[in-house]
Amino acid sequence: MNDNILDALYDMHFEDMTPIQEKCIPEILDGHDVLGVAQTGTGKTAAYLLPILSLLDDGGFPDDAINCVIMSPTRELAQQIDQAMEGFSYYLDDVSSIAVYGGNDGSRFDQELKSLRGGAPVVIATPGRLLSHMKVGNLDLSRTSFFVLDEADRMLDMGFSDDIMQINALLPKNCQKIMFSATMPAKIRELAVSLLHNPVEVKIAVSRPAEKIQQSAYVCYDTQKLGIIQHLFKNGDLKRVILFCGKKDRVKEIARELKRMKINCAPMHSDLTQAERDEVMYGFKAGHIDVLVATDIVARGIDIDDISMVINYDVPHDTEDYVHRIGRTARADRDGVAITFVNERDISRFMAIEHFLQKDILKNPLPEGLGEGPKYIGRSGRKSSHHGRRGHHAGHPSKKRSSSSKKNHGRNQNN
């Protein structure tokens, strides 16, 4: 990579490449299409941004064209990529970016329009917003040199497959394409075949969660979950908590219930406007909100180092999502707690997570007065049932959080 990029990395205290960066950067610099399979937090944003920015800064690309398009499933991830871009491009005079996403007022759309028509070196966009510009003639991708799909599996889950193909149809045949996904189901393989040309495939195994995360679970019925939450928060001293739910309707419902319990919380889901999301995130980061109730999709854009606890209100659909969720805590040399509620339908799914982790996760006894939970057969083959009895409170880290955070360095390493 060129010296301007290396100078920026030096200033940001980047010293060693992550495995995904080590394998992808040379291939992208050599002009190959790349299919990268790696979970969030492995450094994939830098794995594609750094070589693309280096190539753009070396020159030879049209000044009045959109030279690179990066597709993101959510506004939050688009903003996060844009922030990483600001740091990496600090010494690049002629390479800038614009983030294009919905949920804003008309003035933002007009600002995006000017940048797109005048030619922006790098456009970071959600599919819906980019299509909106495309339909009114604001978009010329005929000279685009790089096309990146970040978190492609999330985009397909959100129903963006047709949108991606429409955008792809506007790209020139010689456009270099890069696609990242946390998982590789058949539909992702099919998308890769239709989009990429002889791609180099880079697959990084899903890493196990940090050992310092205190993982445990409550095997319970759905009707017992709110009672468990009330038990966890009974002392009123839990703060910096994210509670994950699989669906936005459940997020809204749980947030209402927590407020009835006098728990200081706020919901975070895709129905909120961008201004509402920004307000919630500001309140959470500033400590005005103790509990963030969020969906997986929105949570991909949350980059906060001092989360003390993660609660999985339901078991994630795959192991990668479990690792991603609980990886929000115990960051930057801190301790953290991860608690999962496992109902009778999710037992097999949770057993698959334990199989991946190669260990039995501690099962907490249900709080007194909630009755008995479902039977659970762990990896060891032992049955366990969870009666209403007073047991150990798993709600607090056993050690105080470290006051030394290495905050900026940790965030940089994970971009």
Image (cartoon, rainbow, N blue to C red):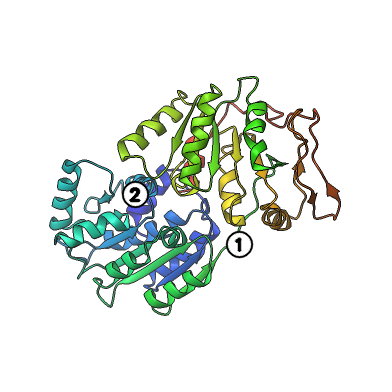
Regarding residue 137, the answer to whether it shows in the image is: yes
Question: Quick one: SS at disc 1?
Answer: loop
Kindly identify which residue carries mark 2. Answer: 85
Q: Position of residue 341 (x, y in %)?
A: 66, 42
Q: Nearer the viewer, residue 16 or 348?
A: 348
Q: Quadrant of the N terminus?
A: bottom left
Q: Position of residue 415 (x, y in %)?
A: 45, 48
Categorize mark 1 by other alpha carbons within 10 Å: few (<14), some (14-19), many (20+).
Answer: few
Categorize mark 2 by other alpha carbons within 10 Å: few (<14), some (14-19), many (20+).
Answer: many
218 is higher (above) or lower (below) than 134: above
Q: Nearer the viewer, residue 247 or 177?
A: 247
Q: Nearer the viewer, mark 1 or mark 2?
A: 1
Which of the 4 image quadrants contains residue 57? bottom left
Residue at 28%, 48% in the rendered image: 102
Q: Earlier in the sequence, mark 1 or mark 2?
A: 2
Question: Quick one: SS at disc 2?
Answer: helix
Q: Nearer the viewer, residue 114 or 130?
A: 130
The mark found on residue 205 in the picture is 1
Amino acid beneath label 1: Ala
Which of the 4 image quadrants contains residue 105? top left
Amino acid beneath label 2: Met
In this rendering, would 165 be left or right of 260? left
Q: Position of residue 289 (x, y in %)?
A: 47, 26
Residue at 49%, 31% in the rendered image: 256
